[in-house]
Amino acid sequence: MDIFLTLFYWFMWLLQLRTYVQFLHMNDQQPYLVPIYDRVFQKLPLMDTQWYISFIMTLFYGCAVYDIYKHRHNWIMISDHYFILISIRMIMMSLLPLKASSDMIRASDVWDVYTGSLLHDLFFSGHVSLITLFYFQFEERWSGYVIMALGVSMAMLLCRMHYTIDILVAPFISFGVVHFRRHVLDWFQAH
């Protein structure tokens, strides 16, 4: 029975990943994207931080794979958190279609190999929300995930890859996903 559940979750994860990538490309083509004024951009210098974002995200993916392997008994919960997070991100990008800053320096990372170059996948930051999701999931490694989230947040602001609001909202959504999933699971187990 466990092998069928495992195969089902892998199939659903791959299906959602493919749907997510298609959604990102569709979102990038929307003609009614709206730019916003960001005061923080006016205070920070514009810098090319592509190498820094690539380094942090590669480090994060390595830590994430290690933590998923170490806590493989919780992989269904981790998969559920990711599924909920990505679903919320697609809904939010549909409701709040933002246009990338005109002076953005596009930084790429390992993820771009699969998705291609995207410009308008803004509200909310997928990089920051994913790192903070792992922070809330694996609290014993909290300091590393906090440092990675702060580093990638600052690098994204410096290259104008995300608006400040995209970055500030992301940890709250990750927190909500983890606690929503835990409370729903507790409620179902109690009833």
Image: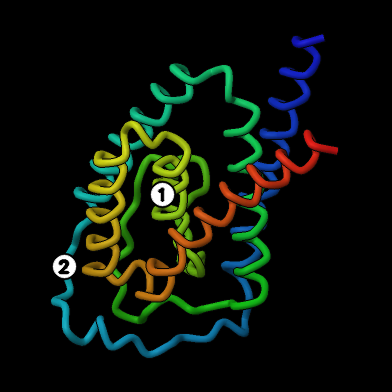
Colour scheme in the image?
A: rainbow
Please report the residue visible at 26 percent of the width from the left and 43 percent of the height from the top.
56
Q: Quadrant of the C terminus?
A: top right
Q: Indicate the secondary structure of the residue bearing disc 2.
A: loop
Residue that badge 1 annotates: 132
Tell me, yes or no, if residue 112 can be seen here: no
**What x and y, as percent, mark residue 182?**
63, 42
Q: Which dot, 1 or 2, sits closer to the camera?
A: 1
Dot 2 crowding, Cα within 10 Å, few <14, some 14–19, many 20+? some
* Image-quadrant location for residue 33: bottom right
Residue at numbered disc 2: 47
Tell me the SS state at disc 1: helix
Q: Residue 63, how many percent across, how many down? A: 34, 29
Q: Quadrant of residue 55?
A: top left
The amino acid pointed to by label 1 is Thr
Measured as percent of width and height from the top left, residue 160 is found at 30, 72
Residue closer to the observer: 52 or 167: 167
Query: Which residue appears at 37% of the width and 90% of the height?
Result: 37
Quadrant holding the N terminus: top right
Front position in the image: 100 or 163: 163
Please tell me in which quadrant of the rendered image residue 103 appears.
bottom left
Q: Is residue 50 left or right of residue 111?
A: left
